[in-house]
Amino acid sequence: MLYDIRLHLHYDYAAAAGGGRHQIRVLPSTISGVQRVIAASLSFAPAPNERSDFLDFFGNNVTSIAFRDAHDALDIRMSARVSVSRPEPGLDVSPDIGRLRQELAAVRSLASDAPHHFLTGSTHAGIDGAITLYAQGSVGGSAAGTAMDLCNRIHRDFTYDGEATTVRTRASDAFRLKRGVCQDFSHIMIAGLRGLGIPAGYVSGFLRTIPPKGKPRLEGADAMHAWVKVWCGRDAGWQEFDPTNGMRASNDHITVGYGRDYSDVAPIVGVLKTTGGQVGEQAVDVIPVVLEKA
Amino acid sequence: MRLAAFDEMLPEVSGLRRPYSAYDRWLKEQDPARLTEKMQDAERVFRKTGITFAVYGEQEASERLIPFDIVPRIISGNEWRRLTQGIEQRVQALNAFLDDIYHRQEILRAGRVPRELIAKNEAFLPEMIGVRPPAGVYTHIIGVDIVRISEDEFYVLEDNARTPSGVSYMLENRETMMQLFPELFQKIKVRPVENYPQLLRQSLAAVRPQSTKGTPTIAVLTPGSFNSAYFEHAFLADQMGVQLVEGQDLRVVDGHVAMRTTEGYKQIDVLYRRVDDSFLDPLTFRPDSALGIPGIMDVYRAGNITIANAPGTGIADDKAIYSYMPEIVEFYTGRKAILGNIPTWRCSEPDSLKYVLEHIDELVIKEVHGSGGYGMLVGPAATKKECEDFSKKLAAKPSNYIAQPTLALSTCPILTDKGLAPRHVDLRPYVLVSDRIQIVPGGLTRVALKEGSLVVNSSQGGGTKDTWVLDD
């Protein structure tokens, strides 16, 4: 599938802000076997005084910007054309949890995609007794089967509620509320799998939403999305699951970055000096591109 | 339980040890009443200079004087040479290990250190992978804790490779001794430690970024006056003649870290930071940190500032890694470790855990990530109830703990109301790494003031002594 993605982040500051410095992780990158970025751009208004682009440890595109002068709003626009083509999930070759542990011990690498980084609790997805107990209900059969089952149960047992949580909510709190958004469901699934000893990480990205039949696609109605990647053993490798929708990541899932949890791939983190609060807005368009045959 | 310990001045078997002979002659000539007076003088000196440390978790008296004993701990030139060889080797290995862990990871590929020990460790910073610190040095200032148990046996207790503190006490102890007993330093040739601040300054200047033009600007970064070692941060900055700064004084400007001065921003080339990794940069680590400098990690990655010690250094002095130090030293230096490790049980291993739980009343159990003597159990000194409670904590999270045998740390006499009395001691020499390794002859001797106690940490009622390395 070919998509044009547009992301618009806008912040209004109650009082003019000075000395702002931000890191932005919103640019998709080419990932072999998943997606190819054909073109991408990221722009800011006002124009920052400093800007540098680099890849972080997990291979994510990071843009670091800084402002010297006071400004009362910040506007960030990203646009990209990405072609997504994930392989069909074939035969399940992942082992059970016992074998998975042995295979894990045999992985000698600590590269950024090594499963060892994704085993311990992290800030947002800490290992939690109650979540582990819940995840145990999905144990049986292969690791991939366990992950799929947990993914489906979270989809079924939890209520989507944009008001219940914030970006700072931890897995344990969202689990008790039984509510949240994609970020919370992903953290709960990650915490659960880690509690079982299955390496799991956070994927941030975009999702193409398919409008109800007969209705036009609403532009800007989409938001950034999050799902989960799970290490399913030496042969099956990393597989991705979307607990918000109870499905495997498909060609409708466009990846921006990977991390141990939200804090590794937050779209924007920043520090600035101001008095009073800020109001932020986010708009996302994921538009399938149909190339006309010449 | 009383442990039969080796006394460094008066071992029971052989009588007075040689390094102490000149001091002993002098001591015998002294009037006991005069010595008692000198003890009180010492306390006055410390009060006047304001050497204090803060104790966490105590409401009254949040700042205390650290008790000082006027009997020096004396090490012969020969003993010191042996120690320094061992320390140098260890420090080389620590830096090589850090470089390897954040680059090629040969030691993990070779299977000498388990990967999950690194990956699961909070002290390991993936953000540092592939980053090459200026001059290739990771740990610039190290305080290796060494214990002695006999004439020839020295062991490393801990490698403090992140932000070792206490060096100001080493300096103040010497200055106090010289004020109190100037005649002693004429009789006995003691190697100097007073030049430590100059050495530190030179050492930090030598690891400046390549891009630095002219004399590098150095600053000491402190979390602020509420930190237990604030006195030391201010003291060292003052002695080196550099600025003492807090995070709010610094800003990233045009790809460099700069401090606010009355004449505008001034670029900093080398930052001796006494702030923990997680607080260093809110954009990279803890977002709620107000102690750090937003964006400093970008500057660091670009090679435009030296951070001493480098972020992520903690992975080398972690207590779980400690037990692998003999392998680590051999892997990188190609030779057996000159200074041994204390045998360590890793409670994460089921067999070790079983042993530790069965022998809890004989062992010292420490938290893997703890420091300062907080959260540890000294089995032989603990009550039955304390042991039982600790067993529960241990069983609940075994990987959080290591255990070591209770060693009969050597003793050294302290002056009490009833004359000399032996007390257990350890030693923390300070090591500076730049293009070379320098070890200040001496260090901080910590002494457990309670009779029979083995805990020397100042937060747990320990005191200090001046440490003499003889120029013989």
Image (cartoon, coloured by chain):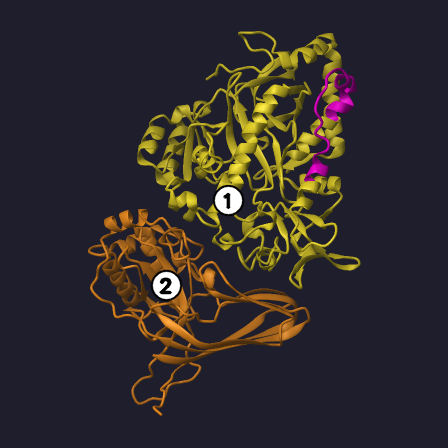
Chain colours: A orange, B yellow
For label 2, the crowd category at 10 Å Cα-Cα, with few meaning under 14, some 14 to 19 and many 20 or more, is many
Q: Is residue B72 above or below residue A174?
A: above
Q: Residue at x 50, y 44 (%)?
A: B98
Q: Residue at x 40, y 51 (%)?
A: A110
- Which of the labelled discs sits on residue B98, or is there none? 1
- Identify the element where label 2 is drawn: helix
| Residue A145 placement (x, y as % from top left) | 23, 60
Q: Is residue A62 above or below residue B334?
A: below
Asked whether B9 falls inside the magenta stretch, the response is: no
User: How far apart are the two marked residues, 1 and 2, measured between alpha carbons?
Assistant: 33 Å
Instruction: Say which amino acid is labelled 1.
Output: Leu
Q: Residue furthest right?
A: B263
Instruction: Say which amino acid is labelled 2.
Output: Ser
- Which of the labelled discs sits on residue B81, or is there none? none
**Residue B118 visible in this rendered orientation of the protein:** yes
Q: Nearer the viewer, mark 1 or mark 2?
A: 1
Q: Is residue A96 above or below residue B190?
A: below
**Residue A274 visible in this rendered orientation of the protein:** no
| Residue B34 placement (x, y as % from top left) | 76, 14
- Identify the element where label 1 is drawn: helix
Q: State which quarter of the image contains the N terminus of chain A.
A: bottom left
Residue matched to label 2: A186
User: In the shown orientation, is residue A217 left or right of residue B93?
Assistant: left
Q: Residue at x 34, y 90 (%)?
A: A293
Q: What is the chain letter for disc 2?
A: A
| Residue A181 placement (x, y as % from top left) | 39, 68
For label 1, the crowd category at 10 Å Cα-Cα, with few meaning under 14, some 14 to 19 and many 20 or more, is many
Give the quadrant of residue B49.
top right
Q: Nearer the viewer, residue A199 or B458?
A: A199
User: In the shown orientation, is residue A109 left or right of residue B449?
Assistant: left
Range of residues picked out in magenta? B176-200
| Residue B125 placement (x, y as % from top left) | 49, 51
